[in-house]
């Protein structure tokens, strides 16, 4: 509550691991965080990393935020989660009081892959096969090879849309049940400045607009 819109952040959340790993995420108002009360102040969220999960119908709501920690945390114990409020309510310029209503921690071995650039073609309908097709290119823009397995995850696919060539659905990588394709098998690697092209094939008998949030994930063992 008492939130203030960006672009500056007055609120931060920091995760600390037992071996010294740290990750601090700025919570920018009207982007990743907003007021508990719908009272005309900060009321916008990005609907990707932050989504609404509760509304009492009287103007109060709770949002769920998802934080994907770097691979360094995979071998450490999460020892603390700290909210830092740099605002000053008394000044009337940048108050930013905040609390966590709940916290869920997943020990999934999958992690967000770094240094992978995504590009996609338009989604095209094939009237003969009655499917929609799209090409996705994953390019390693880093300086080191990316080791497999590498997964391309489609989050927030509408309920009326089916990914026909999915490899599976996420069982530990939130949001659970997101469809994914194995882009790079275990034991292989993607060299710097090289890419892999994936074909996505959708069934959409309901006519729902096809949309999703793309995410590329690596794994230290096992499926996402």
Image: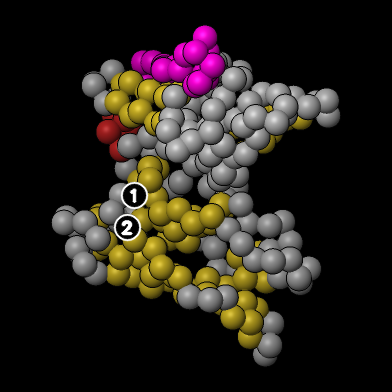
* Quadrant for the N terminus in the image: top right
Looking at the image, residue 87 lies above or below residue 63: above
Looking at the image, residue 56 lies above or below residue 182: above
What kind of element bears circle 2?
Answer: strand
Looking at the image, residue 166 lies above or below residue 131: above
Residue at the spot 32% in from the left edge and 57% down from the top edge: 116
Q: Locate residue 176, reporting x and y percent.
A: 58, 43
Residue 142 visible in this rendered orientation of the protein: yes
Describe residue 142's horizontal placement relative to residue 156 as left or right: left
Question: Decide: marks 1, 2 in contact (CB < 8 A)?
Answer: yes
> How many numbered circles are shown?
2
Asked whether 65 or 8 is in front, the reply is 8
Residue at the spot 54% in from the left edge and 16% down from the top edge: 92
Q: Which residues are magenta?
A: 77-96
Asked whether 143 or 2 is in front, the reply is 2
Asked whether 184 or 121 is in front, the reply is 121
Q: Locate residue 210, reporting x and y percent.
A: 65, 66
What kind of element bears circle 1?
Answer: loop
Residue at the spot 48% in from the left edge and 36% down from the top edge: 6
Looking at the image, residue 197 lies above or below residue 145: below
**Mark sitting on residue 113:** 1
Residue 67 visible in this rendered orientation of the protein: no
Residue at the spot 65% in from the left edge and 29% down from the top edge: 41
Residue 217 located within the stretch drawn in magenta: no
**Mark sitting on residue 116:** 2
Q: Locate residue 183, reporting x and y percent.
A: 39, 63
Binning the other alpha carbons within 10 Å of mark 2 as few (below 14), some (14 to 19) or many (20 upward) gives many
């Amino acid at each position: 509550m008492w939130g203030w819109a960006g672009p500056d952040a007055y609120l931060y959340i920091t995760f600390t691991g037992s071996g010294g790993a740290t990750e601090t995420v700025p919570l920018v108002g009207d982007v990743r965080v907003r007021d508990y009360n719908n009272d005309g102040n900060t009321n916008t969220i990005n609907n990707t990393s932050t989504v609404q999960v509760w509304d009492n119908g009287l103007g109060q709501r709770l949002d769920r935020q998802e934080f994907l920690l770097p691979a360094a945390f995979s071998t450490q114990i999460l020892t603390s989660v700290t909210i830092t409020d740099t605002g000053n309510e008394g000044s009337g310029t940048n108050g930013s009081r905040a609390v966590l209503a709940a916290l869920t921690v997943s020990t999934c071995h999958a992690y967000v892959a770094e240094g992978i650039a995504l590009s996609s073609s338009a989604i095209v309908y094939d009237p003969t096969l009655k499917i929609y097709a799209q090409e996705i290119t994953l390019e390693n823009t880093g300086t080191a090879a990316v080791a497999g397995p590498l997964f391309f995850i489609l989050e927030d696919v509408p309920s009326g849309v089916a990914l026909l060539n999915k490899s599976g659905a996420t069982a530990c990588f939130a949001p659970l049940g997101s469809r994914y394709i194995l882009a790079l098998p275990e034991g292989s690697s993607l060299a710097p400045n090289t890419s892999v092209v994936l074909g996505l094939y959708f069934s959409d008998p309901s006519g729902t607009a096809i949309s999703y949030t793309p995410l590329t994930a690596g794994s230290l063992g096992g499926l996402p």
